[in-house]
Amino acid sequence: MKNCILRGKILKLLSEVYPNGLERINLISIYYQTDKVDDIEKSLEYLCDKKYVLKKELPHPLKENEKIISYKILPLGIDLTEGTIEKDPGVVIPAEA
């Protein structure tokens, strides 16, 4: 259940910065104090596999053989966060504050 909540928090955050995305390092820095890095990465991959999030890998401008990884919410992910499609039991979207 904890990973379901983490996935929802990540998706909600990405919907708030849409149409922009966030770099992997920024997402990890936001959640690492409460969640394991491995859980954050698995949650991001899950969201990508479900087609809620797009993962982009670009060559690092200064470091050879390294990539900058970023994530951007896709329309299906926005629909899920807005509740306009059927709920996904693997993603718990946080309630509005």
Image: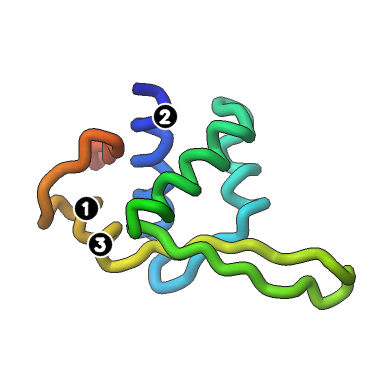
Instruction: Kindly identify the residue that appears in the image at 81 percent across and 77 percent down.
Output: 61
Separation of marks 3 and 1 at Cα, in angstroms: 6 Å
Indicate whether 72 appears above or below 40: below
Given the image, on which type of amino acid does mark 3 rest?
Leu
- Disc with the residue nearer the chain's start (2 vs 1): 2
Q: Which mark is residue 80?
A: 1
Quadrant that contains the N terminus: top left
Q: Position of residue 80 (x, y in %)?
A: 22, 52
Q: Is residue 69 left or right of residue 34?
A: right
Q: Give neighbour class at mark 3: few <14, some 14-19, many 20+ (Cα, 10 Å).
A: some
Q: Which residue is mark 2?
A: 3
The residue lying toward the viewer, choosing from 54 and 83, is 54
Image-quadrant location for residue 74: bottom left
The answer to the question of whether label 3 and label 1 lie on touching residues, with beta carbons closer than 8 A, is yes
Separation of marks 2 and 3 at Cα, in angstroms: 19 Å
Callout 1 secondary element: helix
The residue lying toward the viewer, choosing from 63 and 25, is 63
The answer to the question of whether label 2 and label 1 lie on touching residues, with beta carbons closer than 8 A, is no
Q: Position of residue 7 (x, y in %)?
A: 39, 40
Image-quadrant location for residue 8: top left
The residue lying toward the viewer, choosing from 5 and 54, is 54
Image-quadrant location for residue 94: top left
Instruction: Kindly identify the residue that appears in the image at 42 percent across and 57 percent down.
Output: 14
Q: Which residue is mark 3?
A: 76
Separation of marks 2 and 1 at Cα, in angstroms: 17 Å
Instruction: Kindly identify the residue that appears in the image at 19 percent across and 54 percent down.
Output: 82
Indicate whether 17 appears above or below 24: below
Quadrant that contains the C terminus: top left
The answer to the question of whether label 2 and label 3 lie on touching residues, with beta carbons closer than 8 A, is no
Given the image, on which type of amino acid does mark 1 rest?
Leu
Toward the top, the furthest residue is 1
